[in-house]
Image: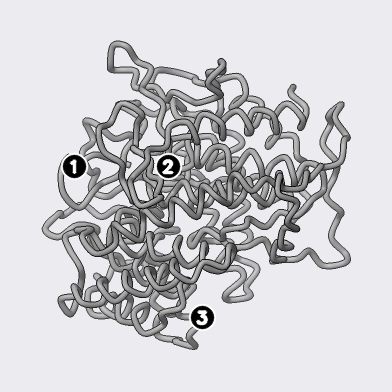
Amino acid sequence: MADTGEIEALAADGLRWLLAAARDTGNGGLGWPVRPSDGEVDPMLYNGTAGVVPVLLEAWRHFGDDTYADGALRAARSLADAVDGHPDDSLYFGRTGIALVLRAVHRELDCPAAGLAAARALEGVRARFDGTRWGELFELMGGNAGIGLGAWAAGDAELALLALEPYARTAERTPAGVTWEFRAGVAERLHHVSHGTLGIVYALAAVGTAAGRADLVGLARAGAADVVARDEGGPDGLLIPHSDPPYRPDATRRHSYGWCHGPAGDAQVFRLLRDALGEPGWAELAGRCWHTVTHSGLPRRLWPGFWDNNGRCCGTAGVLALACDRIAEQGDSPDFAHVLATDLLDRATRDARGARWSNVEHRSDPSALEPQTGWAMGNAGIVRELLRYTRVARGGDPAYTFTWPDQPVPRPRTTDERPVPRPRTTDDRPVTRPRATDDRPLPRPRATDDRRPVPPSQATEPMRPAGADVTS
């Protein structure tokens, strides 16, 4: 298996390809297209410019190279220019996510203009609220839950509560708890983080706890109870179906394993509930999710359509994020995280331009998809996890420079917990942090059952508010 030096070098190559894919947007700005072949840049968090900024901040802290900070500042200029005319208000596809990233640039790089643009973006979001929702989506990625979670993280408590309070009057009672529609007029109910009940649960629990709103926390409990009651993977594991009744069963497997519609994302919700509510049962559920992930066969491609994705949303990088959380919090063995990082090394395309990753659509010819730049399916999300893995594997800080709104910060381990074991690797070199080329000191970072289902496809794109109705 690869040592951490190889993984760190892979991340550096991925950053080189990513920076080369940037476009000059005028006025000193930089933007990224979803794919290098696309004609226009996209500002969104999911797979556009806003989703690139967090990995630039991560690389700046990790390598101590101001090139990445400069890239983040120039990206913030293009995001500020995009705020007023952007048609979407959501966390992953719209202005809430853009505002959250602009706030981070303001804080980390002392850029007041980014903070002003963030405030303008959030005011624009507030102005388009219709009293219940912002559009057809009503979940984490494209709807109220993400807007509430992102607004709270960006410092706008009033907007956060405005977004989340409608869930009380729109909840649908079920035998075990409550659920919600994910899209207006669609009968199927989705269960996981990206577009389903657990994404709403995360937002209600996080904001409800921070705001002292017991009503929102109670609603989160009821939503989680509904999802857990649907388990099909017990007793040791936890495997929740994609949706009931099945949504687009011709194109969507009943069970997935990544962040968006699987136990790698479900575990993040249970981690949050553990911390917010202080109850051990949630940690047990997170552990059952992890059992399911590690016994699923991933990251091997066991059959066409199984584990064809490297990215943070649907693939290996999202599982690596959870693996590193568990190392930091519980002293888990780093061996499975090392398997995941090595798999990303093996699947990378590397040449003089740098490193990038092609996901696979087994029903297409050719099956290898064009590499993407952004957080969800491309370099930005993958490289960010590789940099963190390198630090965690060397016993370093598990905190990210930019805290993702739906991934809890690892809690400190108590004194009676096991120390983090060192990985089995030949590279025990310490992390080096070269000084920036202009010799300015860098600010210190903040502490902060192998059953085989019938596989139509692995989801590789989100359900957007408008356009193609696809399955991630």
Say which mark, if any, is on residue 469. 1
User: Looking at numbered disc 3 in the image, what kind of residue is underneath it?
Assistant: Thr
Point out residue 377 in the picture as x, y percentages from the top left corner.
Answer: 42, 36
Which mark's residue is nearer the viewer, 2 or 1? 2
> Label 2 vs label 1: CA separation?
17 Å
Sequence-wise first label, 2 or 1: 2
Q: Quick one: 6 or 203, which is closer to the camera?
A: 6
What residue does disc 2 label?
376
User: Looking at numbered disc 2 in the image, what kind of residue is underneath it?
Assistant: Ala
Point out residue 112 in the picture as x, y percentages from the top left corner.
Answer: 48, 71
For the point 71% across and 62% down, which residue is it? 443
Q: Quick one: 98 or 300, which is closer to the camera?
A: 98
> Label 3 vs label 2: CA separation?
28 Å
Q: Using a 10 Å C-alpha cutoff, classify the residue at mark 1 as few (fewer than 14 neighbours), some (14 to 19) or many (20 or more).
A: few
Relative to 332, say whether 341 is above or below.
Answer: above
Say which mark, if any, is on residue 209. 3
Relative to 197, say whether 295 is above or below.
Answer: above
Q: Is residue 376 visible?
A: yes
Assign a secondary structure to mark 2. loop
Assign a secondary structure to mark 1. loop
Say which mark, if any, is on residue 299. none
User: Looking at numbered disc 1 in the image, what kind of residue is underneath it?
Assistant: Asp
Q: Using a 10 Å C-alpha cutoff, classify the residue at mark 3 as few (fewer than 14 neighbours), some (14 to 19) or many (20 or more).
A: some
Q: Quick one: 363 or 292, which is closer to the camera?
A: 363
Dividing the picture into quadrants, the one containing residue 237 is: top right
For the point 53% across and 42% down, which residue is it? 318
Left/right placement of residue 278 relative to residue 118 reads right
For the point 49% across and 73% down, which residue is it? 206
Assign a secondary structure to mark 3. helix
